[in-house]
Each structure stands twice: as structure tokens, then as C-alpha cells.
Image: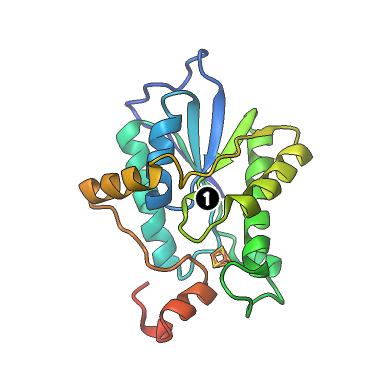
Amino acid sequence: MSRLYVWENIEYHNNNMHERFLLHTCCAPCGIAVIDELRKSYDLWVLFYNPNIHPEGEYLKRKQEVVRLCEEWGVPMIDEDYDVAAWDDAVRGLESEPEGGKRCAACFRFRLFRVAKIASELGFSIFGTTLSSGRNKSAAIIDPVAQEAAEAFGIRYLAEDWKKGGRQEMARKMVCDRNIYRQDYCGCRYSLSERHPDAESYPG
Ligand code: SF4
């Protein structure tokens, strides 16, 4: 069941001057500079939908940092389900693909189609994702999938390479200033065991 966080200090929300924008956020380090930029020009809502993250303790830790940012800036946040079984189905048969390969393409597609569907059902006219902020994430792969999802649900997608324009450097500083948790692997159990072959004992 999804959950909605709405804060007391909402500055931009319900302002008809701004278009409603749903921003899929994968984690706080990837999202911080994007949220800060978009909240100034849109009626911005954040959506946390990342059932790829393993283990659950890590998922909760990443989510909590996004909650912290949204609370700081008064940005409403939708916490969507942690439906791991559905994500597992989406990448079945691609488990041994390397990071950046076909499993990642399926992972992007799975999340972005769900994001576009939620955005459309909730009446947003435009959505975006922070996925391209990731060091190893290519906007050239992410944007066409998101665009396809946008067309399927009759809304718009803001294509942007969030690594560019000095945002990566800005994000690093903002994360450091707030002492935000920064993970050292992408998210799924396969990327975890690539990074930490002793993953069974990784603190979740
Ligand atoms: S490595 Fe990252 S993008 Fe690729 S499948 Fe795993 S969680 Fe998804």
C-alpha cells in the first residue's frame, strides 16, 4: 500500500502558478540537486519507487534519507510499494548480466512504466527521474524508455542528463553538508554481490 507524506512547511505546493511534476527519486545522493532545482519551478512531488533495492534494511535506509530531504524542503512524497516479487519477475533470466547490461534496461523499464502510470492516474502532466544522476547510468538509455512510458500513459517526460551542468559537484557538496548516507553499490542483490562478494554479512 502506498503512503503519502505531506509536510507543514509546504512552500510551492498548491500554487497554480506551477505545473505539477512527479519526480521519481532513486536515492538521496542522486536526488538532492534535482529536487532542489525542480522544486523552484514546479509544484514538485517526489515518488520513491525502488523495489530493486536489496536488502530491505538498505531499502529503508535509502528511503529514509529521501524522506529527510522532502521534509526539509516541504516537498510532498509518495512512498510506493516495495514489491520485490514483481521486480524479480521483471529481471528474470537476466540475473547474470553485468551492471549496465540488459538487466539494468529491464530494471529501468519496470520502474519507469510504473512511475508514468502513477503520474497519469494522479493527474500529473509531467514526470522525471533522477536515475541519470548515477555515475554509471546513461541518459541515452534511460530517456527513450521514459519517453515510451510517457507516451503510453499520455503525459510528458522531462529528458535531462542530471549528471551535467555542475549538478554532480553540487550534489556531492549538499550530501556532505547534510551528512546524507551514500551507498557504494547500485541497489539490487546482483550489484551488491558484485561489489561485496561477502554480501551475506553486509549490514542491511
Ligand atoms: S545494477 Fe542497478 S540498475 Fe541494474 S538491475 Fe541492479 S539495481 Fe537495477
Query: Farthest front residue?
Result: 165
Disc 1 residue type? Ser
Tell me if mark 1 has few (under 14), some (14-19) or many (20+) residues whose alpha carbon lies within 10 angstroms of its own.
Answer: many
**Residue under the image location 40 percent in, 86 percent down:** 198
Quarter-of-image position of residue 120: top right
Q: Using residue 152 as the reference point, say whether residue 45 is left or right of it.
A: left
For the C terminus, the quadrant is bottom left
Q: Using residue 149 as the reference point, say whether residue 119 is left or right of it.
A: left
Quarter-of-image position of residue 119: top right
Residue 185 at x, y percent in the picture: 43, 68
Query: Farthest top residue?
Result: 17
Q: Quadrant of ligand 1?
A: bottom right
Which sits in the foreground, 77 or 179?
179
**Residue under the image location 67 percent in, 56 percent down:** 110
**Residue under the image location 44 percent in, 34 percent down:** 76
Which sits in the foreground, 199 or 34?
34
Which sits in the foreground, 101 or 91?
101
Up the image or down, 99 lies above or below 135; here it is below
Q: Using residue 106 as the reference point, say whether residue 195 is left or right of it.
A: left
